Image (spheres, rainbow, N blue to C red):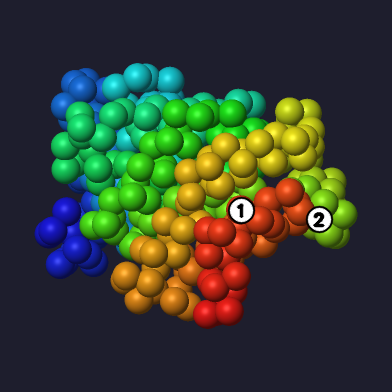
Amino acid sequence: KALYLQTTTFCTELFISEQFQTVAQSNLFKSSEITASLLDLMSIACIDSVARNYIAEKYFILLSECLSIEAYKFAATLVLLKTWNFTKLKGDAIDDMASTLINQLNVPQNQKSADRLKQDELAIEGLAYLTLKLSVKTLLLSNSSLHAALVDYLRIKTIPNSMYYGILVIFANLTESQDSNASIDKSIQGLKARAEPSNIKSDKDTEPIKEATILKFISDCILSRDVIGLVRSHIKLRKMQGTGSHHQLLRLIHHAAKNKAFIETLVSQGSVTILLES
């Protein structure tokens, strides 16, 4: 990875060369070690747009096949996310990818190595994208063990800023209700769907999420665990006012404040102070 970061152009030229690809593709499934190494290489290569586009074009089918193999599905999921090629997947494949990322995060923290913590960071980044999909949002709203794992990460003072931001994006996406203001977006999505019949979404993805489900999540995960106060302290400690994490905290407060029953708790956790300081 260090070599790819330092000599990106050279490494990409080598990666997409006919000689390397002939060897790589002919040996892809010959051994688990070679397959795992190639998937890791592709994940690293995605830092370069040329390599990323090459992988998206040449490896989509192979990566899709890897999603059904237990030993490779997490690494394949990460590559598909980094190339944005997951939008081409059909059926429940995207939901399955989300489940793979959730399973990664549900491993107890005392059992995680430094490498696994890095994988958790990537899993959080992936879920931050995928929570824009309604079926994935529904999946995450019902997973209390995942909620606890994400809040536990927010309590770690040394957590990377990008990881912290990703968790707040997930929470902000999950607390966003489908109100009448979304009608314009739905109209645009409808026009796109008609223009692109191959991208028709499943019935499951068009079902609205019940408001009660979102309110329960806000109450049980966000307010009961003092996420607002926790994040406020973290942002103040790291002097992160005005950053992406601060913006996501404001989104979280805004979504929760739509319900009058939550106002008193929000005030007690410092929401008014946060708004005044913004």
Q: Tag 2: Cα neighbours inside 10 Å, few (<14), some, or many (≥20)?
A: few
Q: Residue at x 44, y 76 (%)?
A: 241
Q: Residue at x 53, y 29 (%)?
A: 143
Q: Position of residue 138 (x, y in %)?
A: 64, 33
Q: Tag 1, which secondary structure?
A: helix
Q: Classify residue 275 by image quadrant.
A: bottom right
Q: Residue at x 61, y 53 (%)?
A: 265
Q: Position of residue 56 (x, y in %)?
A: 45, 47
**Quarter containing the C terminus:** bottom right
Q: CA distance from mark 2 to mark 1?
A: 27 Å
Image: 96 above or below 147:
above
Q: Amino acid at mark 2?
A: Ala
**Mark with earlier residue (2, 1):** 2
**Quarter containing the N terminus:** bottom left
Residue 276 visible in this rendered orientation of the protein: yes
Numbered label attached to residue 265: 1
Q: Classify residue 22 by image quadrant.
A: top left
Numbered label attached to residue 88: none
Image: 224 above or below 5:
above
Residue bearing mark 2: 182
Q: Closer to the camera, 136 or 158?
A: 158
